[in-house]
Image: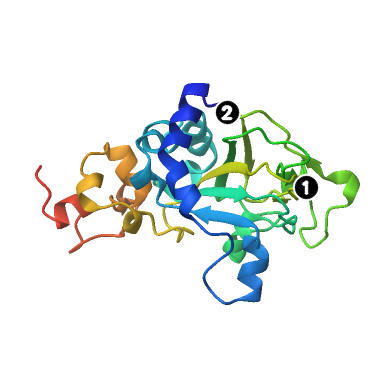
Amino acid sequence: MLSPQTVASLREELDPTSDSTSVGPKVDSANVNYFWGEQTKRFTRLAQRSQTFADQVLIHPLLIAIADALLKPHCASYWMNTGQMMIVMPSGAPQYMHRDSDDWPAMCGPTKPVCQISCMFALSDFTAENGATRVAPGSHKWSDFSRAASDSEITQAVMPAGSGMIYTGKTLHSAGANKTKNQPRFGMHMSYIYGWLTPEEAGCLGVTEERAKTFTKQQQQLLGYRCYDASELNGGRLWTVDYEDIPTGLGWPQ
């Protein structure tokens, strides 16, 4: 999904932040720490930190096509849920299996429509030993979302750098254990949700206004620098400034 040159550019632009980021969260919460991973580095604001992310990942043609097909029937537009580096360091424990759509309990269930499309990109080779994502294929179609996946239902997304695992928010998955001594697993998560749902990442707060002005309208929409306008669906407008679209409300040059 990503060329070797694109992977190299992403790593070059993001490795300084990767190197300076500590493992684990800053908040003192056992639950957050357990989910985050005591030996896992996470950071966002990727569109601010990487032009390659903004141009090659945020608007990846395949992901956009899938989001158009699965999300647009239920919303006027969608936006970025999060673009996040997830680096499982050596000795990192496996994460517990979960569904990302559990962030919005009313939207996660066997009969609910898909509200999130995600891709885990490998920016280094994903192996069974270094923490390749664990996934229960088909779990998005289960009739009972309360049951756990058995070992026989779980596989790992072993894949070379540049590959991606695309899945919906209803799919059970988790980071694997990094059993190596010196091989960090560099993963990049990219996901979209309905434009009327609150995203995991405060996208527009992670990108300066001046930088946002340089992006296309599509990029601005995904990052929260455009309003959600459902007028053509007999709906209203959300995420406005003075009830104007954000560029107008902020007085950007037309």
Q: Residue 46's spot in the image, x, y percent?
A: 41, 46
Q: CA distance from mark 2 to mark 1?
A: 22 Å
Q: Residue at x 26, y 52 (%)?
A: 208
Amino acid at pointer 2: Gly
Vertical order, 83 against 157 (above or below): below
Where disc 2 sits, the SS reads: loop
Q: Are marks 2 and 1 in contact (CB under 8 Å)?
A: no
Picture quarter containing residue 40?
bottom right
Amino acid at pointer 1: Lys
Q: Quadrant of the N terminus?
A: top right
User: Within 10 angstroms of label 2, few (less than 14), some, or many (20 or more) residues?
Assistant: some
Q: How many marks?
A: 2
Which callout, 2 or 1, points at the residue further toward the start of the chain?
2
Q: Is any part of residue 83 visible from this angle?
A: no
Q: Residue 80's spot in the image, x, y percent?
A: 44, 48
Q: Which residue is mark 2?
A: 162
Q: Residue 88's spot in the image, x, y percent?
A: 64, 50
Which mark is on residue 179?
Answer: 1
Q: Nearer the viewer, residue 241 or 176?
A: 176
Q: Residue at x 73, y 53 (%)?
A: 91
Picture quarter containing residue 52?
top left
Vertical order, 177 against 72 (above or below): below
Left or right: 169 as drawn, with respect to 75: right
Left or right: 197 as drawn, with respect to 206: right
Q: Residue at x 62, y 45 (%)?
A: 168
Q: Residue 152's spot in the image, x, y percent?
A: 90, 45
Task: Select label 2 or label 1 by which is in front.
Answer: 1
Which mark is on residue 155?
Answer: none
